[in-house]
Amino acid sequence: MTVKAALQQALGAGLDRLDAELLLAFCLVKSRTWLFTWPEHQLDADQYHHFQRLMKRRSAGEPVAYLTGTREFWSLPIRVNASTLIPRPDTETLVEAVLARMPAKAAAVADLGTGSGAIALALAHERPQWRVTAIDREPEAIALARSNAEALGLTIRIEQGDWCEPLADNSQDAIVSNPPYIDAADPHLSEGDVRFEPRSALVAAEQGMEAIRRIAEQAPAVLRKSGWLFVEHGWRQGEAVRLLLSNSGYSDVETLSDLAGNDRITLGRRPAQ
Ligand SMILES: C[S@@+](CC[C@H](N)C(=O)[O-])C[C@H]1O[C@@H](n2cnc3c(N)ncnc32)[C@H](O)[C@@H]1O
């Protein structure tokens, strides 16, 4: 079977074009561009069977990133697995917000709930002079973040722990987090890719606000004077997060929108102590 015929077969089986191209390129260990250049290339038997298996799993709903083991974030190839969230394009807005507000010179920045390490690694890639710490509670996520840092040749400190617990008092210029923020009763949890992602990365108590509340409570102790907290949240949680930060004494509280124009990131400066 040729590349062109394999793609047509996948589309006929109901796969999205992009998913089909990503899976076929993965089976052939080639880029997507290569597929367009060599449409008449013949798949060998192993490649054909591998593609058939992946097509079947994708049709059953498994995320492409778990099938290929990688997802691009901030133009970096990030390894992913079922221990944590697949990094989302919206989270690049969080990286942009941190880069725009923090001085480019030396800074200490911690990424809480790092998962694959995507945010911490994007920051370390852009600002090699920063001291970036990545924290997660799940040992498998820690191992994944470590393997990503090694594969990308980026230096970050990686610690297992509960939110700010591994950080010393008054040690950070910024705390950054994309924590779990979905309510356990949210029907979206039984749709699409999220069905395959771990609850530990998605769900928080208190209508999805528990992790954000705990981070907002803990951050002032580990932030330096005028240090920033940046937190990602659900598109309907902007007002609740602004209220939480303002009531906790944070100043300069502001919500930023994601690529679709929805409330997505709220930030604020450490309360005066
Ligand atoms: C929404 S995922 C974000 C992963 C990654 N930062 C990203 O943006 O793709 C949330 C992460 O928080 C971690 N987590 C959950 N509870 C935690 C806790 N109490 N302390 C530290 N990390 C926690 C989960 O293991 C998961 O990796």
Image: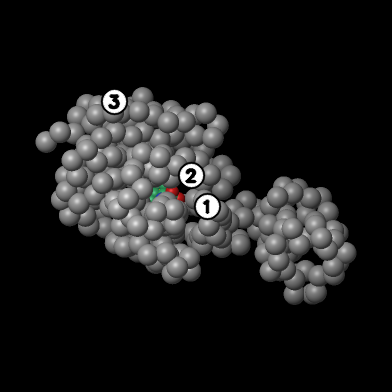
Measured as percent of width and height from the top left, residue 187 is found at 50, 36
Please, what is the three-letter code of the amino acid marked with disc 2?
Answer: Glu
Say what secondary structure mark 1 lies in. strand
Above or below for 43 versus 108: below
Q: Report the residue marked by disc 3.
A: 243
Say what secondary structure mark 2 lies in. helix
Q: Report the residue marked by disc 1.
A: 73
Report, in whole angstroms, how far the alpha carbon at label 1 lies from the one at label 2: 7 Å
Q: Quadrant of residue 203?
A: top left
Please, what is the three-letter code of the amino acid marked with disc 1?
Answer: Phe
Q: Are marks 1 and 2 in contact (CB under 8 Å)?
A: yes
Above or below for 53 versus 123: below
Q: Residue at x 34, y 43 (%)?
A: 102
Q: Are marks 3 and 1 in contact (CB under 8 Å)?
A: no
Q: Horizontally, is 205 left or right of 148 in the view? A: left
Measured as percent of width and height from the top left, residue 235 is found at 45, 31
Measured as percent of width and height from the top left, residue 90 is found at 50, 41
